[in-house]
Image: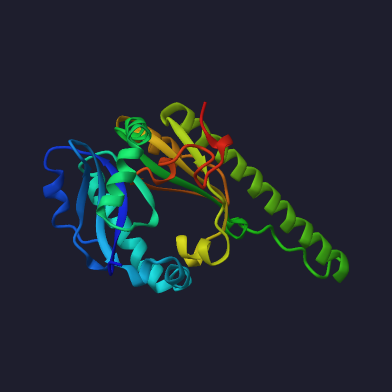
C-alpha cells in the first residue's frame, strides 16, 4: 500500500494557463499542487496534492479532526488553494479532507461525475459567494435613566428595571428582524441563490467576530452573487442596519462558492433558504 494518498481540493473548469497557475501553489502539508484531468478531455480538472496516508486514513483522520491546531492548518491550506485558483477559473470546492487512493482513482471519480460537475460549474460561472451575518447587541443600546431608589421600594425598582431591560431586548430583536428583511430584499434583487447556515454560538461566534462586541448571531446566510451585481448587493446590505439601534450587519467575501458547491439538501444550508 502506498504511503501517499491523493488529496482533492476542487473540481475546476480547465482554462489556458491553469496548470502554470497551480504549479507554484503549496497545499496541505506544504505539498505541491497539480491537476488531474480526464483522459482525452481537458475541459475539467481535479485540483490535487499528495499527503501522507498515515494522517488521512479513516482512524487517523478521526483523531486529527479533534486537534484544532492540525485542523486549522489543513483548512487554511485547503481554502488557500481554492481561493488562488478561483481568481483564474470557475471552482467547485470539495469538502475538507477529501482523499483518494491515488491519482488514477481520482481520475475515475472525475470521469464518472463529469456531467454533474459540468452542470454545477456552469451554474456557478461568473458568480461569487458573500457571507452575511446579523448580530443583535442589546448592550449597545443606551440604557434608560434608572429609577431613583428613593422614589420606589427596592422590589418595585428592581422589577421595573428588569422590564426596561426586556423591553430593550425585544426592541433590538425586532430591529434585527427588520435588518434581515432588508438583506433578503437585497438578495432577491441582486443574488441568484441563498443558503441559510446555522447561527454561530459560543466559541465559534466569538472567534468569528470581535470578541469585544460579538453580540448574538441571529442570521448567518450565504448569497451567490453575479460579479456584475456585487457592488449593488453590498451597497444595500451594508445599509441594512441603518437607523436600527443594537443591530450590526457584517458582509464577508467575495469567496469561492463553498456554500453552493452541492445542490440544496446535500450541503450545510437549508432548502428554504433558496431565493425564488
Eyeballing the image, is 240 above or below 59?
A: above
**Which residue sits at x=34%, y=65%?**
74
**Which residue sits at x=39%, y=57%?**
96
- The image quarter containing residue 26 is bottom left
Along the line of sight, which residue is nearer the eye, 81 or 94? 94
- Quick check: 217 left or right of 160? left
Q: Position of residue 5 (x, y in %)?
A: 30, 62
Q: Position of residue 147 (x, y in %)?
A: 77, 63
- The image quarter containing residue 191 is top left
**Which residue sits at x=50%, y=40%?**
195
Taking the image as drawn, is residue 209 in sight? no
Extreme residue toward the front, this view: 1
Quarter of the rendering occupied by the N terminus = bottom left
Eyeballing the image, is 114 above or below 52?
A: above
Q: How is the image coloured?
A: rainbow
Q: Position of residue 256 (x, y in %)?
A: 33, 45
- Quick check: 101 left or right of 211? left
**Which residue sits at x=83%, y=62%?**
159
Eyeballing the image, is 148 above or below 135?
A: below
Taking the image as drawn, is residue 50 in sight? yes
Along the line of sight, which residue is nearer the eye, 7 or 188? 7
Amino acid at each position: 500500500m502506498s504511503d501517499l494518498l491523493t488529496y482533492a481540493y476542487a473540481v475546476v473548469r480547465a482554462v489556458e494557463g491553469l496548470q502554470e497557475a497551480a504549479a507554484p501553489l503549496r497545499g496541505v502539508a506544504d505539498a505541491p499542487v497539480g491537476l488531474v484531468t480526464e483522459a482525452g478531455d481537458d475541459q475539467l480538472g481535479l485540483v490535487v496534492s499528495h499527503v501522507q496516508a498515515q494522517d488521512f486514513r479513516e482512524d487517523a483522520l478521526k483523531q486529527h479532526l479533534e486537534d484544532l491546531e492540525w485542523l486549522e492548518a489543513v483548512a487554511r491550506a485547503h481554502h488557500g488553494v481554492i481561493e488562488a485558483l478561483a481568481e483564474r477559473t470557475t471552482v467547485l470546492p470539495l469538502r475538507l479532507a477529501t482523499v483518494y487512493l491515488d491519482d488514477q482513482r481520482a481520475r475515475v471519480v472525475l470521469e464518472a461525475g463529469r456531467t454533474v460537475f459540468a452542470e454545477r460549474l456552469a451554474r456557478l460561472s461568473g458568480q461569487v459567494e458573500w457571507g452575511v451575518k446579523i448580530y443583535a447587541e442589546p448592550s449597545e443600546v443606551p440604557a434608560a435613566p434608572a429609577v431613583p431608589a428613593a422614589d420606589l421600594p427596592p422590589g418595585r425598582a428592581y422589577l421595573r428595571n428588569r422590564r426596561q431591560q426586556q423591553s430593550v431586548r425585544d426592541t433590538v430583536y425586532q430591529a434585527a428582524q427588520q435588518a434581515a428583511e432588508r438583506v433578503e430584499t437585497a438578495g432577491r434583487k441582486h443574488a441568484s441563490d441563498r443558503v441559510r447556515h446555522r447561527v454561530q454560538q459560543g466559541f465559534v461566534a466569538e472567534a468569528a467576530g470581535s470578541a469585544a462586541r460579538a453580540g448574538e448571531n441571529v442570521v448567518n446566510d450565504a448569497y451567490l452573487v453575479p460579479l456584475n451585481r456585487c457592488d449593488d448587493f453590498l451597497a444595500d446590505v451594508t445599509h441594512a442596519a441603518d437607523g436600527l439601534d443594537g443591530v450590526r450587519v457584517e458582509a464577508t467575501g467575495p469567496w469561492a462558492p463553498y456554500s453552493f458547491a452541492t445542490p440544496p439538501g446535500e450541503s450545510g444550508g437549508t432548502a428554504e433558504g433558496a431565493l425564488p
